[in-house]
Image (cartoon, rainbow, N blue to C red):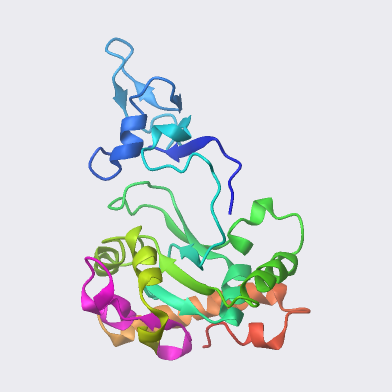
Amino acid sequence: MFNYEGGCYAKVIGLSATAEPEIYACTRRFGTILENVVFDPVTRMLDLEDDRLTENTRASYPLDFIGNAVLAKRAGHPKNIVMLTCDASGVMPPIARLTPEQALYHFISGYTAKVSATEMDRTRSRRFTFSTCFGAPFMVHKPSFYADILKRKILPVRREVLVAQTPAGSAARTESASASASSTPRAAQRRPRRTAQRREVPQGHGLRVRRTRHLPRRPREGARAIQLLENKASYDDRYRSLASRFIENFKKYSEGCPKEVLDAGPRR
């Protein structure tokens, strides 16, 4: 695993020292480049809440401004692969294990949500979106080309593939799913595979959900999406809506796609 970048490019609208202390500190350091950020012309104090120019305010800073950055920008082969999604429906579980076929399905789908805000408690403008391979604008080839690469990477060595939530969804879901967003994949990967307990998400989504009693700072019901919504009828409605979006979106990629991958998606 390696990375070309020599720094970071972060959105800073509404950034606070409490929620994002490292990035916030970088906005105050000499050498950081600020883009579209409003400041007082007299005191030169920044106002990260001011969006009069645009909400797309940014800070660029060197990699070594972040204390725990790996400056070599290189690591060994990954033991696990984690796909992040921002689920605006509240249906997706906080963390689930994917079969190889599900991994290809979700990789091609690239389901997430467009969120204009940076802070966890700023819930404006959340919109469903599918960005194939989680980076549609940058894909030169057809999605199947990149899916085949992923398949060749995970099948021979049977790497574990997880899909994990970043904060989104209903208020109850956000409280559970965002309690420890960065530590959840780490904790899940540390668990011995032989003791992993999983169950299916209701209504045919087919995701095997990790029990969350082993994960840090998580209520035990965190992995049960059906309990995090107001009632079962509410969950069912949201599930059917999300499943329909997945199915309609994947029609664009169904030609030439193996049946086992087509069957790995949610069902109505």
Residue at coordinates 31% horizontally, 24% vertically from top-left? 46
193 drawn magenta: no
Q: Is residue 249 above or below residue 56?
A: below
Q: Quadrant of residue 90?
A: bottom left
Q: Residue at x 36, y 52 (%)?
A: 124
User: Which contiguous range is marked in magenta?
Assistant: 201-229
Q: Is residue 49 visible?
A: no
Residue at the image position 35 percent from the left and 85 percent from the top? 195
Residue 115 appears in the figure: yes
- Labels in figure, total: 0
Q: Quadrant of the N terminus?
A: bottom right
Q: Is residue 20 left or right of residue 57?
A: left
Please tell me whether residue 202 belongs to the stretch shown in magenta: yes
Residue 108, percent from left and from top:
63, 69
With respect to residue 268, does 78 lie above or below?
Answer: above
The front one of 167 and 52 is: 167
Quarter of the rendering containing residue 51? top left
Nearest to the observer: residue 124 or residue 207: 207
The reply, left or right, for residue 202 in relation to residue 71 is left
Instruction: Give how far across and how far down residue 79 sits, in percent.
Output: 51, 67
